[in-house]
Image (tube, grey):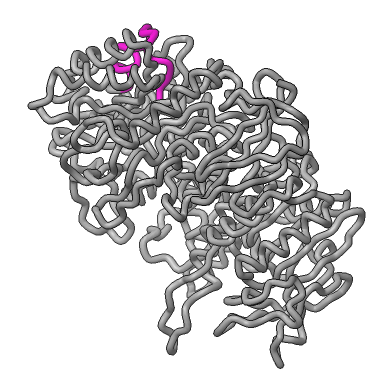
Amino acid sequence: MKKLQIAAAATLLLTALTVSGQNKPAVGAMNDVLYGAAYYNEYMPAELQPGRLDKDIALMKAADITVVRMGESTWSLWEPEDGRFEYAWMDRVVDAMGKAGIKVIMGTPTYSIPTWMYHEHPEVLARPLGGAQTFYGMRQNMDTDNPTFRFYAQRVIRNMVEHYKSNPNVIGWQIDNETASYGASNNDVFTGFVDHLKQKFGTTDNLNKAWFLNYWGEDVNGWENMPPRDGTISTGYKLEWTRWSQMRVTNYLAWQAALVREYRGPNQFVTQDLGGVMKRDVNELEVSKTLDIVADNPYHATQDHFDGQNQAEQGDYTRSLKHMNYLVTETNAQTTDWSSSYQYPPYDGQLRLDVYTHLSSGANMVEYWHWASIHSGQETYWKGVLSHDLEPNRAYAEVSKTAHELKKIGPQLVNLKIENDVAILYSVDSANALDFMPFASEPRQGWAMGRTTADYSTLVHQLHRALFNANVGADFIFPTSTAADLSQYKLIVVPPLYIADDALLMRISDYVKGGGHVLMCFKSGFANENSAVRWVMAPGPLREAAGFSYQEFSNLEKPLALKDDPFKSGDENKVSHWAEFLKLEHAKPLAFYDHPFFGQWPAITRNEFGSGSLTYEGTVLTDKLQGQVVLAALADAHIAPNPNRLPAPVREKSGVNGKGNTLHYFFNYSSDKQSFTYNQKPGTDLLTGKSIAAAQDVDLAPWDLVIVEEGK
């Protein structure tokens, strides 16, 4: 009876919130940069309580920390027993933060269920594909569609938000934490999937045709006969299941956002930390529509591998979701990893440089995970600002230095608006479908599959890095982007667009015809929206814009050189993994394979179509070669790379601040001193207060930067 009551209550609440959650966001632009860390006083050893809170806040105040994130990780303290809620343990922390002038972002604690819930309702755990046994102990191992879980989740959220809705120290709510689908394939998940298929396809006959289920006689004759996802070989089924997984995440977070909005204070925003963007089971674009402001947790390499590119890529993507500023809710403090085998603390200056790197991509807040290192558990070595001894240290000193700077210049850095001439078209459908049918593997024997060495993600990273190295900013656009969205850009970079409907391909073709420029990777246009290979000659609707066709393709057993090194790439004049046998129709060849057989087909082509052009890569390029091809595509689009002729380790990012003034960030991502000539309008280095004249020589110390505000 109790389970039936819980299910009914959860269903009624979900129905109500689907309507009530449509109100407009309450958050606006911020008036200063927020800088802080996640804080968990509850994790402190008992021997250190209660005096530890006072010591931490004294250190935060001395360092000019302005914000903390709390509460998202400890449902068991908010509700130690079914229906008994405790607030005193957190109230003392929130009150102390408020007295110190430190703002609080509170998290809903729904990503890790308490033991009493598991004991009473083990059915809420996520069933993995294949039906393997479920266990308690890991976080994020629940079926978020389960009505029992929803009942308890809505109850704890409602109680928490009501408790803090009038607290002026609590400025916003983070719903859940790094949410994903968790691989759940429980019965309710499968039932929901079948209902989704009914809505999308109408009849099983339509489904059979779309997925070509007569292959191996797997036609579904009646929805009741729909087989589970576990062992399916249908690429159409697999792709649609990933879409359903994404929809589940979106619906779950929309449900939480609506619930928080029903009870929150009028000035409290709703966010969600995406936990590293471009997840395969999360549609971040749809999730962003449910939020007031988007947040991300971008972790990155340090020491000699710290070059700002990963942070810029994550920031560019996150900023593009709502075309507005965003929050960094977690990033590296000292070292990371769930073991002690990846302990690479940042060099002096890298913590500070990291903060400004995020701000230069449009972040309005940077928080570390976390304030103090945990003394036991899975994340013992994922260290915070303070080490296990909880004393001021090298990291704390650098955080303090950065915070003191932000206290002076934060209002001039916040709300940075960035406009770019280049966009990268990101398709999570293509990423997933290419995982099912990978194009690259190690050499193999017989039918034994090898290890994948290149995939959709590696190409996205490679293309973004090539633009980053050229000091050219980039936005991200998506398959749902309209023709008007495309027309804002001079150049659109397209990683393998394996999955696309005809309408998207025609939008790209029309964009080129109207004067746009495209740099496109292999396999684009190959399969339709149901992961079925098109039954017209490749590249399908792109044929006229691309200026070629092809019928054959081959894996490459080993890397091949391009004939005569056409892009002057030296030792990296090589391609690998995949080759399409492109037959030129109108396109011009830019490079041929240097090979007695493959050499009869071009590897890279360029076609002028209408007023624009489409450059196509029929193979996988090395990083340097890709960089050279990107430079050529930029030239075609009349975009100047590296306009200040900066030395290789120096990167430039620009935008307009909230006061309407142009900012130029110059970063030295190296352990060596760098020098360059400033060729922008005169201004002031905000960090030193010194004037910067046009054509002035500027020196950058290792891991240092200048921020020039024009006209000041």
Residue 393 shows up from this direction: yes
- Tell me the residue at 55%/32% (across/down): 359
**Residue with the most extreme left position:** 47
Q: Position of residue 348 (x, y in %)?
A: 41, 42
Q: Which residues are magenta?
A: 157-173
- Considering the image in quadrants, where does the N terminus appear? top left
Q: Is residue 448 left or right of residue 339?
A: right
Name the foreground residue: 550 vs 592.
Answer: 592
* Numbered label tally: 0
Magenta-drawn stretch contains 161: yes
Q: Is residue 390 left or right of residue 585?
A: left
Residue 11 quadrant: top left
Name the foreground residue: 696 vs 628.
Answer: 696
Q: Position of residue 62 (x, y in %)?
A: 34, 19
Q: Position of residue 298 (x, y in %)?
A: 45, 42
Vertical placement of residue 358 versus 499, above or below: above
- Tell me the residue at 80%/60% (across/down): 614
Q: Position of residue 701 (x, y in %)?
A: 54, 42
- Tell me the residue at 43%/10% (across/down): 265
- Tell me the residue at 19%/50% (across/down): 135
Vertical placement of residue 149 versus 230, above or below: above
Vertical placement of residue 633 versus 417, above or below: below
Residue 102 quadrant: top left
Residue 119 quadrant: top left
**Residue with the most extreme right position:** 610
